Image: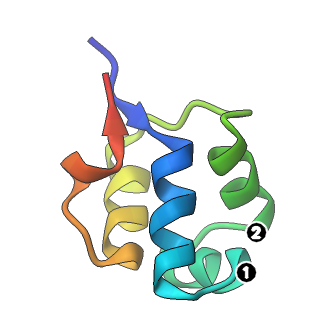
């Protein structure tokens, strides 16, 4: 079973925090384009370190932003 980031949830949490895609990307060590693609579901991100980085940047547990 592959676990990936759930884009709509990432976007909702980012917006709730009031941060831009650019700021989230900086916090997670990713590019703004990658964050945009994650949020739109245009890319499947399943690498554990990337999932962890996004979760930490959003200050949530990884289980809250992943889908099976």
Q: Locate residue 34: give its quadrant.
A: bottom right
Residue at 41% in and 40% down? 47
Quarter of the image for the C terminus: give it: top left
Using the image, determine if residue 63 lies above or below residue 19: above
Using the image, determine if residue 16 lies above or below residue 40: below
Extreme residue toward the right, this view:
33
Residue assigned mark 2: 32
Residue 41 % position (x, y)? 66, 35
Residue 30: mark: none
Residue at 46% in and 40% down? 6
Residue 36 % position (x, y)? 74, 56
Tell me if label 2 and label 1 are in contact, CB under 8 Å. Answer: yes
Identify the element where label 1 is drawn: helix
Quarter of the image for the N terminus: give it: top left
Choose the circle earlier in sequence order: 2 or 1: 1
Residue at 52% in and 37% down? 45
Residue 22: mark: 1
Figure coloring:
rainbow
Using the image, determine if residue 17 lies above or below residue 46: below
Identify the element where label 2 is drawn: helix
Number of on-image labels: 2
Circle 1 packing at 10 Å, graded few (<14), some (14-19), many (20+), is some
Using the image, determine if residue 39 lies above or below residue 54: above
Circle 2 packing at 10 Å, graded few (<14), some (14-19), many (20+), is some
Residue at 55% in and 46% down? 8
């Amino acid at each position: 079973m592959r676990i990936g980031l759930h884009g709509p949830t990432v976007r909702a949490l980012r917006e709730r925090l009031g941060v831009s895609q650019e700021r989230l990307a900086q916090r997670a060590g990713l590019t703004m384009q990658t964050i945009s693609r994650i949020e739109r579901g245009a890319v499947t991100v399943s690498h554990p370190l990337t999932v962890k980085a996004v979760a930490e940047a959003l200050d949530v547990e990884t289980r809250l932003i992943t889908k099976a």
